[in-house]
């Protein structure tokens, strides 16, 4: 068996995410589904097939973006992050289409005695193009920003596009600590400083109190945080900023119409093909509406 090494000769910092990151940038809106610990093969296949059918139908209707360029709709990129057990199957079901495959976590080490864990090299080998890191459900289980930074470095080493999640708890928001908490999570979860270079990175602002609760942050709250994150990351070039927290078809367009929101990270609603597809359509509506982020240029 060949054991992956951390420096396996691949370009550090350049993701293999051809469906997502082209010419050094991610353009348009990005809609990412986080299936969490949901999905058995049969239902997962139906869900993926339904999404692909919607994409194909849109192609027939002439609304389709450049599938070959990774856009499921004009200006809209889509990815799904199933549990580890389904990655290879979902990769095969998605083959040749415009939906990218991602994972929900990785281990920082390339290989070894880490029972139950999956390395970034394994994810790349399974066909992943991106990896969610630092999700609040993992931070709440004890994961630290320092550990997340190591995972992020491993993701880069394996040409995975990291989606770094940060977010405040309700208590922290009520105490007026939101921006300080986010700044702390951001700086400590990155294996590099916020002032140098342009590493491929996506940041998802996910207020903990809005995840899976049906509570969505107000547009003002989202706008304030995204503006803050835009300022914080200015030294990295344009870092796409996603919002996550009870996004659904009915609120997705107004959220993505905000100037600094480049897309959404969707949990529960991504398990329903029609709902998830409507969110992708909402991204297109938001793009068409003007007043959008520079990433849409
Ligand atoms: C998430 O899991 O990242 C998430 C945002 O979940 P939900 O959309 O269900 O709130």
Image: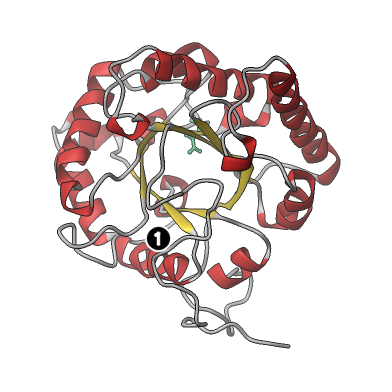
On the image, the x and y values in percent for residue 32 come to 53, 37
On the image, the x and y values in percent for residue 154 come to 44, 70
Instruction: Check the image and report above or below for 140 versus 190.
Output: above
> Could you classify mark 1 by the number of other residues whose Cα lies within 10 Å: few (under 14), some (14-19), or many (20 or more)?
some
Res 175 quadrant in image: top left
Q: Of 15 and 182, which appears nearest the observer?
A: 15
Residue occupying the point 70% across, 27% down: 55
Query: Quick one: SS at disc 1?
Result: loop
Q: Is residue 285 left or right of residue 281?
A: left
Which residue lies under the disc numbered 1? 143
Instruction: Check the image and report above or below for 241 versus 73.
Output: below
Q: Of 215 and 49, which appears nearest the observer?
A: 49
Disc 1: residue Cβ within 8 A of ligand 1's nearest atom: no
On the image, the x and y values in percent for residue 1 come to 73, 88
Q: Of 124 and 58, which appears nearest the observer?
A: 58
Taking the view exactly as shown, the residue that stands out farthest to the right is 42
């Amino acid at each position: 068996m060949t054991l992956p090494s951390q420096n396996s000769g691949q370009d550090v910092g350049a993701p293999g995410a051809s469906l997502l990151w082209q010419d050094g940038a991610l353009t348009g809106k990005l809609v990412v589904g986080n299936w969490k610990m949901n999905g058995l093969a049969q239902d997962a296949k139906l869900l993926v097939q339904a999404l692909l059918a919607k994409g194909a139908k849109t192609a027939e209707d002439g609304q389709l973006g450049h599938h070959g360029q990774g856009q499921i709709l004009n200006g809209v990129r889509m990815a799904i992050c199933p549990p580890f057990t389904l990655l290879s199957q979902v990769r095969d079901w998605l083959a040749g289409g415009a939906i990218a495959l991602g994972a929900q976590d990785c281990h920082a080490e390339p290989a070894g005695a880490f029972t139950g864990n999956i390395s970034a090299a394994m994810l790349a080998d399974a066909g992943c193009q991106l990896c969610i890191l630092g999700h609040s459900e993992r931070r709440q289980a004890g994961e630290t920003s320092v550990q997340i930074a190591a995972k992020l470095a491993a993701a880069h080493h394996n040409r995975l596009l990291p989606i770094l999640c940060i977010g405040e708890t309700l208590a922290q928001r009520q105490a007026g600590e939101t921006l300080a908490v986010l700044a702390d999570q951001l700086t400590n979860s990155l294996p590099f400083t916020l002032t140098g270079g342009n590493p491929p990175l996506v940041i998802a602002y996910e207020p903990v109190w809005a995840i899976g609760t049906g509570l969505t942050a107000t547009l003002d709250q989202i706008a304030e945080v995204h503006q803050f994150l835009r300022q914080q990351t200015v030294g990295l070039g344009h870092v796409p900023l996603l919002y996550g927290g009870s996004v659904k078809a009915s609120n997705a367009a107004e959220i993505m119409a905000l100037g600094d929101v480049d897309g959404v990270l969707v949990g529960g609603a991504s398990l329903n093909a029609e709902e998830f597809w409507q969110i992708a359509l909402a991204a297109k509506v938001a793009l068409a509406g003007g007043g959008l982020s520079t990433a849409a240029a």
